[in-house]
Image (tube, helix red, strand yellow):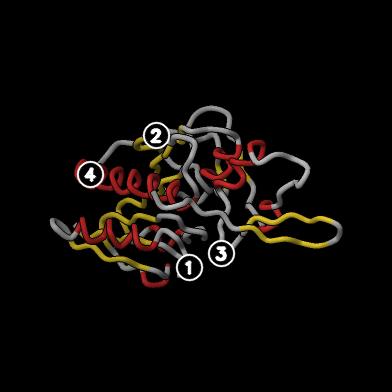
């Protein structure tokens, strides 16, 4: 089969994992990694992973199946940054839902669900690593079992908003323990932690000491 693995942002954290998936698929299939939606060519399966844009319908028509893997228990948790929002809610079990991309965001038929289990100490890189490996596992399963019959989404839907730099603000009057989940999901480079005191803004970065 001809398979495309697409990440539509050149700065995405998921690019190394997308390339890893494409390399694994090359053992049995013709697989390419794509970093621009305009580079899409016809094929059998397209994986849209950690994408930020809605793929136009005429590009979806290039493949027999167009797959998205979203980090929530759809139809709950549609929208932006679902894994960080759930960690902030105190969850240590985060669903991944594999579904068919359609015109409406996060609304296509569901093929498979799985769960990423966290222990409560992981920082952002570790959270992403565990999730990425599960995404690769699910994508490989889909290819091995293709074609797969999907189920229509049912139930009440909910949406997460886009996170912004302001969502990384700490409250200096609260304890570290109270804000630890916020610290876990902070991006040290793009959206670092900060707090404001006496009119001054202070930037914080968090790392684990090497064991």
Image spot of residue 92 (x, y percent)? 48, 33
Residue in the foreground of this view, choosing between 195 and 147:
195
Q: Read off the residue under disc 3.
A: 189
How many neighbours does mark 3 have within 10 angstroms: few (below 14), some (14-19), or many (20 or more)?
few
Image spot of residue 63 (x, y percent)? 31, 57
Image position of 10 with respect to 138: above or below? below
* C-alpha gap between disc 2 and disc 4: 21 Å
Which of marks 1 and 3 precedes in the sequence? 1
Q: Which labelled disc corresponds to residue 11?
A: 1
C-beta proximity under 8 Å, tags 2 and 1 = no
Residue sitting at x 21%, y 41%: 145
Which of marks 2 and 3 precedes in the sequence? 2
How many neighbours does mark 2 have within 10 angstroms: few (below 14), some (14-19), or many (20 or more)?
some
Q: Which labelled disc corresponds to residue 115?
A: 2
Q: Which labelled disc corresponds to residue 146?
A: 4
Q: Helix, strand, or loop for circle 3?
A: loop
Which of marks 4 and 3 precedes in the sequence? 4
Left/right placement of residue 120 relative to residue 23 reads: right
Q: Helix, strand, or loop for circle 1?
A: loop
């Amino acid at each position: 089969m001809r398979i495309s693995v697409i990440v539509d942002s050149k700065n995405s954290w998921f690019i190394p994992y997308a390339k890893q998936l494409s390399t694994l698929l090359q053992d049995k299939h013709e697989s390419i990694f794509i970093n621009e939606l305009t580079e899409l060519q016809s094929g059998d399966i397209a994986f849209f992973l950690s994408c930020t844009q809605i793929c136009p319908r005429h590009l979806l028509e290039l493949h027999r199946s167009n797959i998205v893997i979203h980090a929530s228990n759809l139809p709950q948790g549609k929208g932006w940054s679902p894994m960080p929002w759930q960690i902030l809610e105190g969850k240590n079990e985060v669903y991944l839902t594999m579904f068919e991309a359609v015109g409406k965001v996060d609304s296509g038929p569901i093929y498979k669900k799985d769960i990423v289990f966290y222990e409560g100490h992981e920082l952002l890189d570790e959270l992403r690593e565990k999730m990425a490996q599960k995404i690769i596992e699910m994508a490989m399963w889909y290819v091995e079992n293709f074609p797969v019959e999907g189920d229509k989404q049912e139930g009440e839907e909910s949406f997460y908003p886009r996170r912004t730099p302001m969502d990384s603000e700490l409250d200096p009057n609260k304890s570290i323990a109270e804000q630890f989940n916020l610290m876990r999901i902070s991006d040290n480079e793009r959206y670092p932690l900060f707090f404001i005191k006496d009119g001054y803004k202070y930037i914080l970065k968090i790392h684990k000491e090497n064991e």
